Structure formats: C-alpha cells, structure tokens
Image: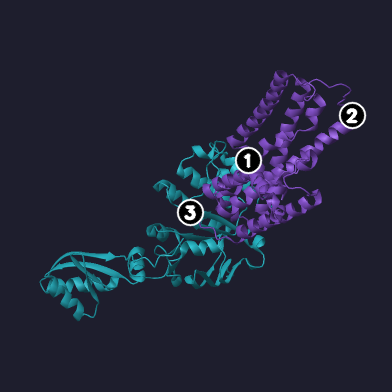
Amino acid sequence: MKPVVELKNLSKTIRSKKIIDNLNLSLYPGQITGFLGPNGAGKTTTIRMMVGLMKQTGGDIVIDGVSLRDDFEEGLSKVGVIVENPEMYKFMSGYKNLIHFARMHKGVTKERIDEVVRQVGMQNRIHEKVGTYSLGMRQRLGLAQALLHSPKFLILDEPTNGLDPAGIREFRQYLRKIAEAEGVSVFVSSHMLSEIEQMCDRIAIIQNGKLIDIREMSDARESFYYIEATPAEKAKQMLMDGGFTVEAFKDGLLVNAEQHQIPGLVESFIAEGLQVFAVQPHRKTLEDEFLEMTGGGQIAEAYAK
Amino acid sequence: MLKLMQNEWMKLWHKKGTWVMTGILIIITAGMMGLMKWISIQQDMGGNFTRAGMIQDPSSVGGTVLLLTVIVAAGIVASEFSQGTIKMLLTRPVKRWKILLSKFLTVNVFGMFLMVIGYAVYVLLALLLFKSGAGESISSWSVWSKSLYMLLLSFGNVFITATFAFAIGSVFRSSSLAIGLSLFIYFTGSTISAILSRYEIAKYLLFTHMDLTQFETGMMLVPDLTMPFSLAVLAVYIIVFLVISFTTFVKRDVTA
C-alpha cells in the first residue's frame, strides 16, 4: 500500500537542542495510527511540523506524494487538522466559523458544509454563537472544520480532551467509520492510553525525539496467566522447574503460559497438595507496555516552549 | 485573496467593538462640528467659518479615524494569537504571506471606510450648520477637489500609523503594545521633530513626514521639505515596517 504521509528523517533543533531526531514514519490509508510518548517527547512538535505551524530544520514531510517544502498549499490541502482544543471565533456563530474556514479551501460548497454539520450532529445549534457552546460542542465543531474539505489525512492532537465518555465513544466510532469507509488515514496523539488502545490499528511511540517503536495492534501478544496458589514459594519453584518465567504480581504469580498448558499445571499443583485460588488469563495493557518501554514517567529534559 | 479579505471583513464586523468605533467616529465628528459652530457664534467671526471654508479642510476627520484604525491594525494579528485561533488559520492550505497581506489590506480598507463615513458626516454638518460666505459657491469644482485632496493627505497619516501599529502588533503579538507605541508616536512625534528641526537628522525622521497636510496648510515642522521628498522617506519607512512584519510572521514557529 502506498503511504499517504511520509516523514523522512524529520529533525527539529531549537537553540542547538535536538527536539526531534531523524524521525521516519509512514501512515497508510484507512489506518488509524496512535502517537504516544511521555510529556516533552516531541509529539506536539512533530504534529506542528506536519501541519505547517513549525518549520523543520531537517528532513522532509511528504503528503500524498507532495513535499510540504516544495508545495505547501497543495500538500496541506489534503490534511484536516485539530490541534489540541479547537479554538474558534467565539463572537461568530458555528456556521460562520465553518464558512470562514471553507473559504480557505478550494471547492467546499454550501451543501458540503451542511452535510458535515449533519455528520457531527450540530444542526440544531450551528447558528448560535460559539461562545455559548460547551466544550463537547466545540470539539464537534472542531471535527467539522477538519472534515470540510474531505481530507485524505486527518491529524488530531489530543482530540478527546474534555469529551464525556459518551462523546469519546461516539468520536471513536466516527473516526473508525471515516477511516474504513472513506480510506482516510488518521493520526492521533493522546495521553489516554486506553483510548488509543481501543481506537488505533497501529501505534508509534516516541521518546526524546526518537521513534522507539511502531507496532500493529493486531500483533499476537505473549500470553500470560495469573496464578494464585499457596504456598507461593513451592508454586513458584514448580513453575520455574517447568521452564516458565515467573513474576510476582499482586498476591500471586504471573506466568508466561499458553492456554493448553494450564490444565496440566493445575493438575500438578493439586497433585502436590497446593491450594489453588485463582487461575486467569492476564492481558498486559498498553499502559504496562508503554511504561516498560519508556521507563516510567520521567520527563525528557524540558525544552523552552 | 478576495476570499481571505472577505473573511477578515466578516470577523471585523462581528466584533461589537467595530460597531462601537464607527459610532464613536460619527459622534466625535459631529461633536467637533458643533464645537466649531459654538466657537464661531461666541467669537462672532462668521467670516472665518464659512461653509466652503469648512468643506475645504476636512483633515480633522483624519485624527479620529487614525485612532480607531490603529486599534484595528494593532489587534488584527495579535488577537488571532491571543484567541488561539492562529493555529486554525495557519493550518490551511494558504501561504502565510497571503494571510498577512489580506489582513493588512483589510486594515486599509477599514481605514478608508471610516474616512468615507467621517467625511460624509463632516460634509453633511458643514452644509447644515454653516452659511456660505460672501461670493462663495460650494458648487464649484475647486472647493470639492481641494476638499478631497485634503482628505487624501490626511489619510496618509492614517495609513502610516496603521502600518506601524500593524507591524508592531504582528511582530510582538501584543495589541496593547502596538496601540500604545503608535499613539505615542502620533502625539509626540511632531514635538520631537520640532525639537530636532535644527539638525539634519530631523529630515529623515518618520515623524517629520507623517502629517502630509502640512504642505497645504504651510505649517511645516521642518522648513525646506518638499512633498516628493516626504513621500520618498515615508515609502522607505513603510517598506521597512512591512518587510519586518512579513518576515517575522512567515518564519515564526507557532506554539500558542
């Protein structure tokens, strides 16, 4: 598949500090890619470079075959953007705001505006001033402005900030829909790991300005089981003798056993007179993996904003 | 470009302040005319305040327009930053210089618009309040061409000060700084020029040339100036302001 967006050796240096260091990333149509990283890792800087708010010091951004360096207008015309909270002109109605942004793109008709307004479910309040909107409504309006010109690539920075659970769910389903139905490539940065986990096909993790991992969410993961048995030492010894790696977890043990090995394990425990309280499959969450990979919460050296 | 200007115009008129400013302009202009009438009655110098005489010098409109245009010029870029809307504006497939140019042109269109409104009020009241002097006729072409010429000259000051405010506002992203500095220059500039008028340097100061009506009224700040020379000096300043404004705006990394 041909990527919609390619970042090639992207670098950004601010006052001789490398904020982004040779970043390479490709984003494909129909895929939702999550962008994760601890605070200060360079997520926002990367996104700002991709949408023309910042200039890269090295490397290139290619959108649908067009380098932003060569033809900024042509490249960005394929991109829909929500950067953090979508700030709108509060003194104008939502509809006027959409007209305002529509004028800055080629070929957005009145019908298209109405269509987008319906899609995000804002038709009842669209003619009221943005100042009267709740945060959730502003987010919807933000999504509407990003979709006006039917972009091939949608880039979202912390999109679910301030949405209630129902709103987040709806938002997620909506993104899925446009990714699948219209083949839009979506790039989402977020701190909310569970959010990313449920939404994305693919995850890119950045730390200290470097991409440290890209993985497909569908990748088969190692299977873990949580086993609680007493006496714990004996159980642990038996498992280790059986060639498993064992880890203490809460009151019990975490074992990298496959499903078909479990009945045998339980039988041998009982035969040895161990009391078994719990055996359950354990799924490592994205959060666990993320913290493992990035080494906990230490913030990369802060840089001046 | 027209669409971008249409956008700016729409945003401008959706702000209450713009309407208030237009109202203020009408009130101040009318007030000044009333004051002139009152003075002419008090001093019983009907001869100095004739209908044609008033119409021929509408430059007082320029001062009010200048104040109001400076406010708009200072805020038109700075407010996008303070509202956070700048990131919505710059993530469009439109080059930055086009966006800035549309804002600059809109400021000037707004200034001209205020000039026209102020002038209309001025002329209307001149016709209502003042009598024609002996042998005067306001139907003659010379009265009106003089009047429009004065209006144009006083717009020069509006244009220069607004450009300055626009440049400061877009470089420092602070409308209050831009308004403050521009008005400071407007009010103290002529004093500074007068103080320095003995020295050669006064000829190259911006302040000396800002008021173009001096060539018609003859009240020159620095003697021996000519209109073409003034225009040349002004052009240099304007270009410098705009180059600074455009280069910083185009190069800036937006982190707001």
CA–CA distance between discs 2 and 1?
Answer: 38 Å
Of B198 and A251, which appears nearest the observer? Answer: B198
Q: Is residue B239 above or below residue A91?
A: below
Q: Position of residue B26 (x, y in %)?
A: 67, 29
Of B224 and B76, which appears nearest the observer? Answer: B224
Q: Are marks 3 and 1 in contact (CB under 8 Å)?
A: no
- Residue at label 1? B12
Q: Is residue B130 left or right of residue A60?
A: right
Q: Is residue A250 above or below residue A165?
A: below
Q: Colour of chain A?
A: cyan
Q: Position of residue B206 (x, y in %)?
A: 69, 51
Q: Which residue is at 78% across, 40% downward?
A: B218
Disc 2 vs disc 1: which is toward the camera?
Answer: 2
Q: Residue A84: which disc?
A: 3
Q: Reading the chain from its start, which is encountered first: label 2 or label 1? A: 1
Circle 1: residue type = Leu
Q: Are marks 2 and 1 in contact (CB under 8 Å)?
A: no
Do the residues at pointers 2 and 3 share their chain?
no
Circle 2: residue type = Ser
CA–CA distance between discs 3 and 1?
Answer: 25 Å
What chain letter is assigned to the residue under label 2? B
Q: Colour of chain B?
A: purple
Q: Position of residue A19 (x, y in %)?
A: 47, 69
Q: Residue B140: which disc?
A: 2
Q: Secondary structure at mark 1?
A: helix
Q: Which residue is at 47% across, 71% downward?
A: A17
